[in-house]
Image (tube, rainbow, N blue to C red):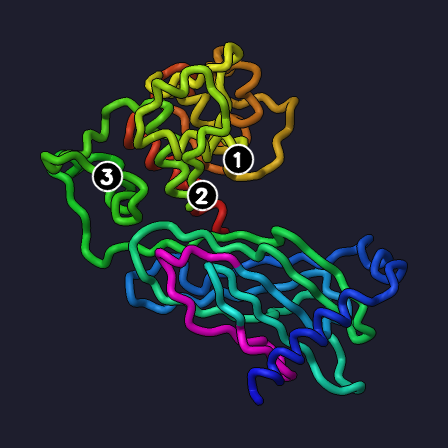
Amino acid sequence: MRKWKTLLTVLCFSLCVSILPSAKAAALDTVKPKLTLRLETKEAAVGQEISIVVKGEQLKDLYGFELKLKYNEAKLKFKSAAAKWKGMPVTPDHKNGVITFAHTKIGASTKGENGTADIATFVFEGKANGVAAIEIAEAKLVDSEVIPVQLKNAARTFVQVASASAIAFKDTKGHWAEAAINRAASLTIVNGYENGAFQPNAQVTRAQFAAMLMRALDAGLDPAGSAGYKDAGQFPAWARPFIESASRTGIITGYEDGTFRSERLITREEMAVMIMRASGDSLDAASVPAFADEARIAAWAKPAVDQAAKLGLVKGSGNNRFEPAAHATRSEAVTMILSLIDHLNK
């Protein structure tokens, strides 16, 4: 009986959304609400609970909703979902890393939510070390007249499940990036070598940086080779899925001759461009970085370097120089990637 009641509620909710007059629905598109995800705990240990609040902005008489939340099942365990206001919830449907949760208020005299308000809370438990992306893939919001607004890819955030015990490398003690290196290793963004070293000052290849960045963004890997680089046969086997994934999402591009050059050492300006593409922030094409060696920064990299510097994601060296063509080190790459994750979680 309970199963049928739940099914009926879901069907009624979906049906109400689908049969409404398109003209009324279109009218709401001019001022669409915005959804965001707020982490109550940005960094947790395995076994620790993690609460994530769905917040709505620009709401207009929000009366009911259906949310589809995607998450990484390998790193997080789903525990519960609850609406922030009274009404009739639908038992969350949890399948293949997607949680579907619906809720509606009850009663003709009950008012909808307006302006800014918390909508729902999802609770997870840390399952395995790493960065886990959580995304509102789809959302249906309805008002008291059951007029819908539909949103796709409405919000994304990152949960950091880290080891409670410190990770120590034999060659990072006292290094300026020691804390960042240990944090990144705990989040499985980077690994050390078999001899227990990290080699913080070693330079980074384009393939290595692609792997670090994709792990940090918890991006789905693409081993199929869809990017079609001419030199794909030369990619290290371990790096291929990361390169393809980064290319598919537009974070990394190849060279004009159709090659990627996976073993080429990455430059600081290339790294800044990839970081800003991953951030999703808009760039001012006319902006000029305020570094003393700005003239040496390639034109295609200047907007990204400028914005990354303003956000604190990249820093200059002595005498306010950026050194755009210098090859980035493992410690620099780790520091920049962690700054990106913290920026995305603000």
Left or right: residue 174 versus residue 69 is: left
- Point out the image quarter for the N terminus: bottom right
Q: Of callouts 1 and 3, which one flags the residue occurring earlier in the amino acid sequence?
A: 3
Is residue 86 highlighted in magenta? yes
User: SS at mark 2?
Assistant: loop
Q: On the image, which quarter does residue 268 sit in? A: top left
Question: Residues under labels 2 and 3: Cα distance?
Answer: 18 Å
Q: Which numbered disc covers residue 219?
A: 2
Between marks 1 and 3 in the image, the one whose residue lies nearer the viewer: 1
Q: Which residue does the image show at 38% across and 61% down from the upper left?
A: 76
Q: On the image, which quarter does residue 319 sit in? A: top left
- Residue found at the far bottom of this picture: 1
Question: Which secondary structure dominates the residues rendered in magenta?
Answer: strand
Question: Residues under labels 1 and 3: Cα distance?
Answer: 24 Å
Q: Is residue 276 visible?
A: yes
Q: Marks 2 and 1: CB-CB under 8 Å?
A: yes
**Closer to us: 302 or 18:** 18
Q: Is residue 265 visible?
A: no
Q: Which amino acid is tagged 1?
A: Thr
Q: Of callouts 2 and 3, which one flags the residue occurring earlier in the amino acid sequence?
A: 3
For label 1, count other residues whose C-alpha is less than 10 Å away and answer few (under 14), some (14-19) or many (20+). Answer: few
| Residue carrying label 1 | 249
Give x and y (percent) for residue 91: 55, 77
User: SS at mark 1?
Assistant: loop
Q: Which amino acid is tagged 2?
A: Ala
Q: On the image, which quarter does residue 120 sit in? A: bottom right
